[in-house]
Amino acid sequence: MGASWLDATRERIWVQTFPSRYSDAELFAAFDELDALVAKVAKDGHRYCLISDVTRARVGNAVHRKRIAETFTTTRRLMGDRVAGQGFVMAHPVQRGALTAILWLGRPPWPIETFATREVAITWAEGKLRAPPR
């Protein structure tokens, strides 16, 4: 795999940036990396937000959508209500349609919002982390 898609340098806000082109193996490796981070912090007691920036990404296929839904299941199992929210940065209605298809496979219990810019998504995530748990 090339460079990591995951930026975990912000306190408790993870930003996953999808490149414009990627192979199946790269997508699977990116979600394996996210799953490993979730497992690492699963018992630390903190709440987290995830921002998925897909503005440059192509719409994946059914195999990709299934793999992403599997990460939702892993995260739900390991972290439960400690996920304060997940934001998706999207540029196109087709991307929103792909997200709808992923959520049909298994909607996580945490809030999900879509945003036009990464900055607005991060500001939203900061607010979710400051708010009391639901």
Image (cartoon, rainbow, N blue to C red):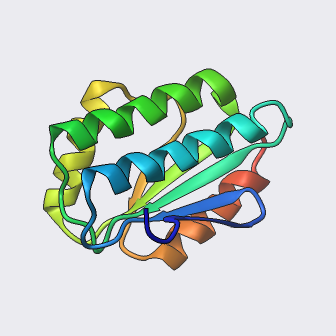
Q: Quadrant of residue 83?
A: top right
* Horizontal side of residue 113 vs 80, given as left or right: left
User: Which residue appears farthest toward the front when viewing the image?
Assistant: 1
Tell me the residue at 44%/50% (across/down).
29
Quadrant including the N terminus: bottom left
**Residue 27 shows in the view:** yes
Residue toward you, 134 or 102:
102
User: Which residue appears farthest toward the top when viewing the image?
Assistant: 77
Give how far across and how far down residue 114 sits, in percent: 38, 58
* Horizontal side of residue 58 vs 131, given as left or right: left
Give how far across and how far down residue 39 sits, in percent: 69, 34
Quadrant including the C terminus: top right
Give how far across and how far down residue 10 sits, in percent: 73, 68
* Horizontal side of residue 45 vs 22, given as left or right: right
Tell me the residue at 75%/33% (across/down).
42
Give how far across and how far down residue 46 sits, in percent: 82, 42
Tell me the residue at 48%/26% (across/down).
73
**Residue 133 shows in the view:** no
